[in-house]
Image (cartoon, coloured by chain):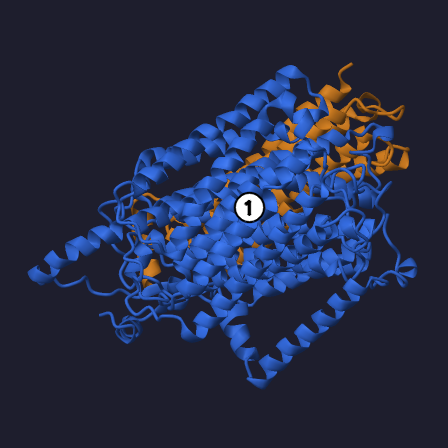
Chain colours: A blue, B orange
Amino acid sequence: MPVSPANLTGHFFVTGDPLIYGADASILLASAAVVFVLTYYKKWRWLWREWLTTVDHKKIGVMYLMAALLMLFRGGVDAILMRTQLMLPNMKFLAAEHYNQIFTTHGTIMILFMAMPLIFAMFNIAVPLQIGARDVAFPYLNAISFWLFFFGAMLLNLSFVIGGSPDAGWTSYPPLAGLGFDRGPGENFYLLALQVSGIGSMATGINFIVTILKMRAPGMTLTKMPLFTWSVLASSILIIYAFPALTAALALLLIDRVAGAHFFTMTQGGNAMMYVNLFWIWGHPEVYIVVLPAFGIFSEVFSTFSGKRIFGYTSMWLSLMTISVLSYFVWVHHFFTMGAGPDVNSFFAVASMAVAIPTGVKVFNWLFTMYRGRIRFTVPMLWALAFIPNFAIGGATGVMLAAAPADYQYHNSYFLIAHFHQVLIGGVVYGMLAGMYYWWPKMFGFKLNERLGRWGFWLFNIGFYVCFMPLYPLGLMGMTRRMYVYPAGLHWALLNLISTIGAYVMGIAFILIVIDVLYSIVRGERDVTGDPWNGRTLEWSLPSPAPHYNFARIPAVASRDAWWAMKEQRADDLNSGRQPEPLQPIHMPKNSGRPFILGVFFFVGGFGAVFGWYLLAALGFVGVLFALLSRALEYDTDYYISVEEIERTETALGRS
Amino acid sequence: MAVAQDTVERSVRNGVPLEYATADGELKIAGFWLFLSTDLLLFACLFSTYAILRTNTVGGPTGAQLFDIPGFTTETFALLTSSFTCGLATHEMRRGNRAALIAWLAVTVLLGLVFIGFELDEFISYATHGAAMQRSAFLSAFFTLVGTHGAHVSLGILWMLTVVYQLAVRGITAVTARKVFIVGLYWHFLDIVWVFIFTVVYLTGVLK
């Protein structure tokens, strides 16, 4: 039901909660501070020309990373608030309604606005450099992807001060999320924000598949590709063939809510389980979308810091591809309790357990890569090492949950909560933090401080186990997810208290990681070689940070671990005195402000649709069409960098 | 741009179609094929929703009562013919005949408009006879599936018009050829989706 402006006047701004007032105040103060700093240092122009209009994959990657860390903070605060409410029996810290909103936004943000941009950050930072390309296949589209993600995230985050947050869980099942139980605009914020950012994710998937399949350096056949690039290929294939199901599910729910249709209203012939099925046809591949790139990062890290080629390269990419196929055949395990019958449940149980096989192959390959290697215990390596026991436990509990008859006991209990946090934090977050520490010098030209990094790592890892191990027994003792309060006398109090302490420790660890970043900006060890880790793949052949055209000459690749081979080859080349090929002018895309403006129009249109203000929604839609039209009629989209300029840049970077 | 022009001439001499002559054109066509495969999945989700809900009429009108055989047959002929004329446009583009290319694209757009006209007329007549999408789950699924296809066709018409304009201004170049080719792929794709709508929705619907 559209909310008319008349009955909104009292509810437009969320009122009555001191936490929200605090958030209002801090949003205003932070915005004022940003505006002041940009104005005082005259940086507006710099911001627009260098960042908001950029189509350079390296800068887009950095923006994804910053946005993802901000969202990690937001989702983390949500988690801390929930754990505080559950610390003791009968707590009165959060009211039921507020608690519902917080677990909804926590899940939504962590999956869609933290994990997704974090993997996209790594895609953008590493893939073109690893395959010897000058950018992605569609740099302009890449910028659009980022801005759609960004404005989608803004739309969702706006809900908690304007209109009210969504509160039907991150899965947003009808009928709970339908009009009958949830009239407020919060649910519309969820639906529209996810659609807007979903378009961006689809475009990223297409972009990276084409980039990887069509733009590899000469000689780099698929089976000579770095494993991170393989994992991005697998993940991108999953993105483009899973997201349409989410788009459909969200669109149908939105049509139900806005146009009064009956896809999910039982009394009018609808079927709510249709939503649940569509949602998880996307939802299960989604967990592999975010975890496969983490597997790719671990492969790079284990190999680099063991000083060895990866063990079992062929089985590594085969298992990546096997997991991506299997992941489409497991979605029903999210709701065995639907009652589809023994045959259907058996099929999905067996398929789910089968995922453990290729995953196990990967784990053993990582272990064998380290076997008899010269292991360096750097921070990225610590995160990678800690991932292994995490995933062993998470995988084992996953197989337990996949046993359909037993799942009737575990379903929606804290056992499940503990399991998926173990694989998502232990897999994705550990992987992305490993990747962040690993590629940081490539992005910024300096290393993050190892000492602070180790403190952050150990506190986070210990905090993680303290926080999540108690949740397994709590689940078996009957504590179900999404309960906002529990009575005394159930023997739950001690385990909950321990878990909350663990959550606080993880919060402190996050602050330490942020301090590490800030400290290293000032004091971090500068990377003058471009190859601070003695790396094996092509990104380490470039200066740090890489020039905007990446490669002055596209490298010719002869084997896996191309840069390692080149380093071994280089001694011979120097002796033979062979001259490098002459430079050629480089063809590059021009910057454009339109992706940003397109994002603004999507935001305006989405905001209008949330409140049923159709004039505003139409304005946004027309704006989107005009932006697309003006791009279609734009022909002057790229330029050439002259040989002289390349020579100047290369000389300034100490290369010739 | 001298470099790019050389590449184009060389590829065309070697028998590579103009739209594939530049690296950029080749990448964009590959990307668009991928996009089409994702759009196909979006329709697959809507089809499966329709298949689940199509008998849930809750006492409201059924497909057999609503669907007008001459109406949807005309629509189908208009759209299938437009796919053929779109193919002729590509053919003329390969021969370098701009006037014929634009003419066939114009015919395609007109047939598309005929299709949309019939569909709108159908939707309005259902809605005014108590068969709007709020009536039953069947009608929700019907309007969403067929309407999504109609929205795609409408967008395709607008898109094709901008391509015609660019052809008129710039002639057949590697860039405009790529644009004609891609909008053509989109148009044929919508035709294929319609074949399924014709079968799954209309033919199955009027069968007893």
Left or right of residue B186: residue A360 = left
Taking depth in this image into account, of A431 and A222 the one nearest to the observer is: A431
Q: Residue furthest right?
A: A6
Query: Which subunit holds the residue at mark 1?
Result: A
Whole-percent x and y of residue B128?
89, 37
Near mark 1 (Cα within 10 A), the count class, few <14, some 14-19 or many ≥20, is some
Q: Is residue A382 left or right of residue A412?
A: left
Toward the viewer: A595 or A8? Answer: A8
Image x and y of residue A558, in percent: 22, 46
Across the whole image, how many numbered discs are drawn on residues?
1
- The residue under the point 44% across, 41% down is A388
* In the depicted structure, whether residue B85 falls above or below residue A158: above
Residue A459 in sight: yes
The C terminus of chain A - image quarter: bottom left
* Amino acid carrying mark 1 in the image: Tyr
Against A116, is B53 above or below?
A: above
Residue in front for this viewpoint, A292 or B208? A292
According to the image, label 1 marks what residue? A465
Residue A577, percent across and down? 9, 63
| Image position of A168 with respect to A563: above or below | above
Snapshot quadrant of residue A328:
top right
- Residue appearing at x 87%, y 54% in the figure: A3
Q: Is residue A644 above or below residue B173?
A: below
Residue B175, visible in the rendered structure: no
Residue A526 on image: x %, y %: 35, 71
Q: Secondary structure at mark 1?
A: helix
**Left/right of residue B73 with respect to residue A360 in the rendered view:** right
Query: Which residue is found at the position 77% from the left and 35% from the top?
Result: B143
Q: Quadrant of residue A21?
A: bottom right
